[in-house]
Image (cartoon, grey):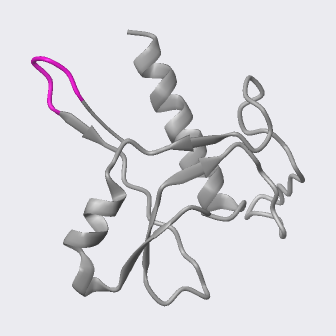
Amino acid sequence: QTTREEGQGITVLLHMGVDYKGKSFKLEKFAYNNATFRIPDERGYQPRNKCIDDEMKLGEALETCLDVEQLEKIMENNDTSVSTDPGRFVCNYTYFYSMDKFRASRLDR
């Protein structure tokens, strides 16, 4: 996510995830309000169909404001693709949580 306000710089939140089956970089377009962990995280937390943000509907998506299609073109020689599904494990959880908090901070101004 990025923002630019008059007199301020740009804020960029960069998330790097791991797809153990992945063969390329993926630029995630969406994050989903759904925490469903097929295995527990490092602390033993293993939610099933839980909302990350209770004020939104289960499964509702947040979309990045970055032009991931343009980024894909710029990175074309780096085996990069646009993804619309970050899974429902820790990567999606942190991506959604960050975008939700970022969005909320923008609404508070």
- Number of numbered labels in the structure image: 0
Q: Residue at x 56, y 61 (%)?
A: 84
Q: Is residue 12 left or right of residue 46?
A: left
Q: Is residue 70 above or below residue 10?
A: below
- Quarter of the image where one finds residue 65: top left
| Residue 34 location (% of width, % of height) | 76, 48
Q: Is residue 20 above or below residue 64?
A: below
- Quarter of the image where one finds residue 60: top right
| Residue 7 location (% of width, % of height) | 9, 18
Q: Residue at x 48, y 55 (%)?
A: 29
Query: What main secondary structure does the magenta stretch of the protein show?
Result: loop
Which residue ends up furthest to the right in the rendered image? 48
Q: Is residue 25 left or right of residue 70?
A: right
Quick one: 61 or 43, which is closer to the camera? 61
Which residue ends up furthest to the top in the rendered image? 109
Q: Is residue 55 above or below residue 12?
A: above
- Quarter of the image where one finds residue 100: top right
Assign the N terminus to one quadrant of the image. top left
Which residue ends up furthest to the left in the rendered image? 7
Q: Which residues are magenta?
A: 4-9
| Residue 70 location (% of width, % of height) | 26, 61
Quick one: 85 or 54, which is closer to the camera? 85
Q: Is residue 8 magenta?
A: yes
Q: Is residue 67 left or right of residue 89?
A: left
Q: Is residue 12 magenta?
A: no
Q: Residue at x 71, y 32 (%)?
A: 53
| Residue 107 location (% of width, % of height) | 46, 14
Q: Residue at x 82, y 55 (%)?
A: 45
Assign the C terminus to one quadrant of the image. top left
